[in-house]
Image (cartoon, rainbow, N blue to C red):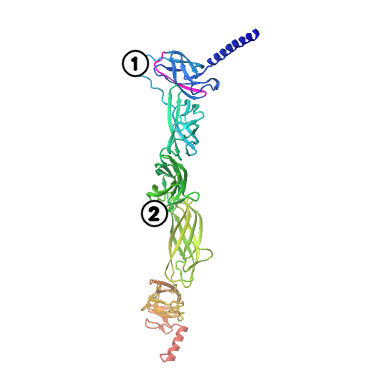
Amino acid sequence: MRRIVKWTLILFVAGLIFGGMAALVTAQASVTVEPSSLRSDLGGTISVYAPGGSNIFTTTTTIRLVNYGILATTYVNLTTLQAVVPTGLGTGTYTLLVLDAGGNTVGTGTFTITAAPAPTATPKPESPPPDGRPILTVRNYTVDPLQVKPGQEFVVSIEVYNNGSRAGENTMAVFSGGDFLPLDEKGHLFWQVHINATFVATQRFRVPKEISNGIHQVTVQLSANDYEGNHYDYPANIPVEVIGASTGTAPATGKPKVLIEGVSTTPARVAPGESFTLTLRLVNRGSRTATNVMTKADAEAAIPAEGGAIAAATDVLKINGVVTVSLPLLLKPVKEGGRLGLSVGLEYSDYNGGAYSDQQTVGLDVDVSLANRPQLLIANYHTEPEEVSPGDSFTLTMELSNVGGGSAQRLTLALGGVDGENLGAFVPVGGSNVSFIPQLSAGAKELVVMRMMAAGNAETKAHNLPVALAYDTVGGTREKDTQRISLMVRRRPNFKVSFYRPVEGTAMVGQPFPLPIEVVNAGTARFNIPTLEATGVGLEFMGESSTFVGNLDPGGSWTLDAMAMTMTPGPLDVVVNVHYVDDLNQTQIISQTLTLEVMDIPQPDGPMGPDGPIGPDGPVGPDVPIETPETLPQKLWRFIKGFLGLGS
């Protein structure tokens, strides 16, 4: 029995010794304190971290500053606490104790209070503190699911961005919950967050059963220190929509209202036929969340530059939420530039199935100048031959010029329209009515040559033909234009001009000779001939050299008997001008040349005396005719006169 009592006492004493040692070990666990010192006149917030990442902190853990007392302590998570050090403490090094709910010490550390700098005898302007500070903002957030019901769990994720000019030290995000109950650890430590860096914090919540319908807030406290120990807080709220509550207020009323509050285009000035991007800033200024937001541009003014639609969709747009949508469009041709309105349609709904539509107008700066666009003109055209008669084949040459500032690509030129339905009395020969030009640069010219034929029954008039032009711009749009040319068709007369009797040997130098001229209408149409005249270089006419003809039927003829004289022997060109009135009631001239030989006066064989030639019987006076050989026509004429009894 004594032995049992003895061992019992031994074990009891050993338990006390080992328990005390364990408590001593726990009490002496060293914690990390940041910052390690504060000024007595400023105070501030310190962060306390458990040693080696051990989970020794709870929501009831407090921090005691020896020789001062318990500090206002905030539980962050199992490894981190925060405490507020008041101002006015004496300078020196303090022992910091971490106490559990029973007042037991679970960690120790040291902390220093420094004195405020003493003023100098000669005051100097204080140096301003270094510029900059960390600035934490919630750049984006998500709520899953988008709408929550009483008793339901949901997850909130936030993306935090350091928009300041200093890195954030000991950066934390603490979800206090607000109207909702945070689950799991509500504090999240991210240590150092550099300038322009981001981090994502995620927290689970539960919706209280007694909550009402509508928009409620999740509160989150963002905080960070800078490298000098200055502490900064950035509270934020995340809206969450609650539906399906059976208690509290009635279901949410009102409706969403989506407005276009910002407009821009790329490029800033839009040209007809060129693609551009329309960027719209949409804001929900209503009292409910908008869903399935559809944005559409007016199809009468613009067509899609990509894809097959001119609309942009947005799934959810919360109250006061902002979203940016972009529409790739191509502006249709317009006649006037400047500030023009483009109608934009908005269609959206809410979570209860309500449907809404709206029509709003945005402004576009439209540039219709030719600085960057092609402009094609038919600068000149002509036919070969110049005059076209029914049944003629001819060559049509058109000069196409690009007077714009952009290049025209894959150009087609269609005479009489694309299908040639307006060619009328003309038909293409050796090819179609369409010509193709791969490219026509700005300022360039191109000749288009077509072989054509006029129908035999073509009317004699000016025929108006459309020329359809189609080409691609640099922006990829297909432009179309129609210009017109006129082709003149006249019936061409066929006049045959000749001597109606032989004239060989009848013309002698210095003596009048006859010009028996005849014109014959060898064509198929009647022509009015006001004048038939004869002219010639060196010719002197004895009497009339022209005559009036009038209407000359096909196959009919008319004569002009003129007497002329010349002093120049040799070949003589007699030009006969036929003045006629064409189908357009305009006087035209057709000239033909007749050639005859003018003989010189033969010289006598005998000697010449002072009074003239000397004949066989003596001098021949000026009144004595000189015998000349009789020509064949003279013999025939003498025979006819003798036969008619008019002389020998």
**Element assignment for label 2:** loop
Position above or below: 472 against 430: above
Image coordinates of residue 527 in percent, x first then y, are 41, 76
Residue indicated by mark 2 = 335
Type of amino acid under label 2: Lys
In the rendered image, is residue 571 in sight? no
Which contiguous range is marked in magenta? 78-90
| For marks 2 and 1 on the same chain, the one whose residue lies earlier in the sequence | 1
Type of amino acid under label 1: Pro
The residue at 58%/11% (across/down) is 17
- Front residue of this view, candidates 497 and 414: 414
Residue indicated by mark 1 = 123
User: In this rendering, which labeled residue sits more in front, label 2 or label 1?
Assistant: 1
Give the numbered dot on residue 331: none
Magenta-drawn stretch contains 428: no
In the rendered image, is residue 615 in sight? yes
Tell which residue pokes out farthest to the left in this image.
122
Q: CA distance from mark 2 to mark 1?
A: 75 Å
Left or right: residue 199 versus residue 622 is right
Image coordinates of residue 237 in percent, x first then y, are 43, 33
